[in-house]
Amino acid sequence: MRRSRLAAIGLAAATFAATAVSLVLGAPSATAALSNNWYAAAPYLMPQSNNPPDPITVMNATGLKAFQLAFILAPNGGGCSPTWDGTSAVSSDTAVANVISRIRGAGGDVSVSVGGYGGTKLGQTCGTVAATAAAYQQVITKYSLKAIDFDLEEPEYENSAAIANELGAAKTLQANNPGLFVSVTMPGTAAGTGWFGTQLIDQAKAIGFTPNNFSIMPFDGGFNGGSSQVSALEALHGLLMSHLGWDSATAYSHEGFSGMNGKSDAAEMFYQADFQTVYDYATSHGLGRFTFWSVNRDRACVGTTDNGVCSNVPQNDWDFTKFSVRFAGATPPQTTPTVTTTPTTPGGGSCTAAEWDRTKVYVKDDAVSHNGHKWTAKWWTQGEEPGTTGEWGVWADNGAC
């Protein structure tokens, strides 16, 4: 997530801490893990910056049960110890611990996000996989975490040694903390992710690391509404299959969306209708994660246009958070539609395009025949059966043939 969104607001920490004054200082009490759907849907919340809202207010208003707390960094002065925002040592923290205790006391839980845009990351300063993992283990132990997010962005994103430390640490944490839900979040492009993101996926495969999901952030890159984000997610789906050797269903189930509500840093606009577009795609394809930046911004701007604390679009408080609740709530994300294993012979005998082949790679404008209809690909695809994924799928129905 963009570090510009970390703009310090002087009253923020004091306001947030005031909600916790009645609590005993110290580590947050452990809680039973929520279902993974909640960790997969947890929206980002900065607990010490960007005028954070009271999480209990958000929970009571929406039914939300999980937050993605951001961000863990290396100390601003250097070193290999975890801090909040580069300034507050995790080892001596009581403020965020109290926030976590309040959330758990209300029946919820948290994941913690490490990295983000800008700042110095532990993967850059710790030097080895073992040291990086040990630093993050302090965070997991301190807060009794059941979930963690590796938000791998600039400048670390382009540092192969740092990324090797981060991914190696993630694999170590996954092994040493059974059941830990691990997300990997990276920048999104129209091609799914960029060159460095593709290298990141290849590095994960090389070390045998499979997170619960690889998520992209399709914003701040020339995007225009929900349809362009869906296109990027479908491109990522192709990358996960081609680079990791996964089938279509496996790729979708390990894929995630991390959006930005309202006005992005690059002045792209994402409205509630755009979130609905991506939500429909995510649930109909069985995606493994649906989150956004951030709860701090999930309110209309009143007396300010500071993009760190409000969305700059017309809305009611927590409109975007409610999509997270829907994704993770009583009705879990849908599974990928069942597909046949053998191509069906087209009916009518008059289709001139070649029959769809599950094993073949198709690109934009490729035409196939299937079940007596002609279909045209909207983007790269492999293994997605025409007619099974609805209007948000890759195949445009050109009618009977």
Image (cartoon, grey):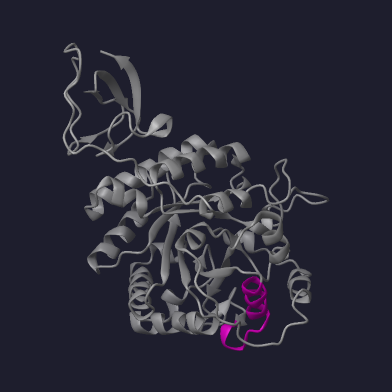
Residue 322 visible in the shown view: yes
Asked if the magenta segment contains residue 91, the reply would be: yes
Give the residue at x 68% y 67%. 49
Observer-nearest residue: 63 or 199? 63
Give the residue at x 48% y 35%. 227
**Quadrant housing residue 90:** bottom right
Give the residue at x 24% y 39%. 383
Observer-nearest residue: 77 or 251? 251
Q: Is residue 279 above or below residue 143?
A: above
Give the residue at x 34% y 52%. 195
Asked if the magenta segment contains residue 297, the reply would be: no
Residues rendered magenta in the picture = 89-105
Observer-nearest residue: 198 or 325? 325
Observer-nearest residue: 232 or 253? 253
Can you say which quadrant of the picture contains the N terminus? Answer: bottom right
Q: Residue 100 placed where, x, y %?
A: 62, 75
Horizontal relation, residue 87 to residue 196: left or right: right
Horizontal relation, residue 189 to residue 60: left or right: left
Q: Tell me which secondary structure the magenta stretch mostly adopts.
A: helix
Q: Residue 296 placed where, x, y %?
A: 68, 59
Q: Residue 379 placed where, x, y %?
A: 34, 33
Can you say which quadrant of the picture contains the C terminus? Answer: top left
